[in-house]
Image (cartoon, helix red, strand yellow):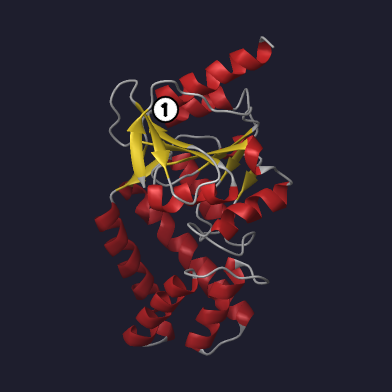
Amino acid sequence: MKSDPLTTPQLGSPVKHLLVDLDGTLLGNRNLPLGFDFAGRSLNTLKKYGSFKNNFGALVEIYREFGKPSKDRTNDLRVVEIFARRMNMGLEEARKIMREGLFAIFPELQKHFYPIPGSRDFLEWAKKHYPLTLATNPVWPPEIIEMRVKWAGIDPSIFGFVTHVRAMRSVKPHPEYFEEILGLQGLKAEDCLLIGDNVKMDLPATKVGIRVFIIESRPKKNALTLLKHPKALASAWKGSYSSLRTLLEAQLSETENR
């Protein structure tokens, strides 16, 4: 992937729908302490159901399972099946234990998260002009995602659709994830713009024709960069929330004046 300074920014065809990532885009986290805290609490919760080796193996297997998309099973079902087999229990019992564990663990993790500057103000503006989809990596249930959106200081109800573990069959950065978003909502790729923060996880949306805007963690004022990906079918940019809003406002103004 290469990047060039952008001198004449243009979004192209009218953007009609915004797909918005969560982690790193709306909600930041202190990655290392969060990872240790989550893993420790998870293993402590599971210790009464099996050995440390078996429980740790279950977490690793679940992580690896997300490394490939599925044609017929939701992410939720795939995770539950692994957990049930590892713990030698039925699917419903496994689902109940996992759900109770997540709802006990996640509220204790809030201290590791913080709102991304500029994200709330941007969405307050954007929700007046576009339908919004929360295009977060679908590895958590909707209740946990809603909790975390609130940690970002954002009202979850502004999103018409949320990609969560029970709704999706693939995860980022697989192109199938982005195709599934389009299919579930009846959207056209050329009408959408994905707002994310991670080139590796979000830029693959351009492979299915979705434009992408990467929010920089420490942007220079009004700086805007055009990103290039060899397999891209759509354009991508990198910059601040301010530069993104400027791009969208310019297009809205142009459309209104036609």
Residue 164 visible? The answer is no
Answer with left or right where residue 142 lies relative to residue 152.
Answer: right
Q: How many labels does the image show?
A: 1
Is residue 79 depicted above or below 135 in this figure? below
Residue 67 drawn above or below residue 229: below
Query: In the image, residue 219 lies at what x, y percent?
Result: 30, 30
Rendered position, 143 above or below 49: above
The C terminus lies in which quarter of the figure? top right
Residue drawn at the location 55% of the way across and 57% of the way down? 175
Report the residue at 42% width, 80% height from top: 58
Q: Where is residue 239 in the image (x, y as percent from the top left)?
A: 37, 30
Q: Is residue 102 left or right of residue 109?
A: right
Residue matched to label 1:
241
Query: Given the current orientation, which residue lies at the most extreme right position?
Result: 186
Is 37 placed left or right of 149 in the picture? left
**Disc 1 on helix, strand or loop?**
helix
Residue farthest left in this picture: 33
Quadrant hosting residue 64: bottom left
Residue 28 appears anywhere in the view: yes
**Residue farthest toward the bottom in the current orientation of the protein:** 88
Residue 141, position in %: x, y? 56, 59
Residue lying furthest front? 230
Residue at image location 52% in from the left, 80% down from the top: 82
Rendering coords of residue 19 (x, y %): 57, 40
Q: Which amino acid does label 1 sit on?
A: Tyr
The residue that appears at 58% across and 52% down in the rendered structure is 178
Q: Residues within 10 Å of mark 1 (few under 14, many from 20)?
A: many
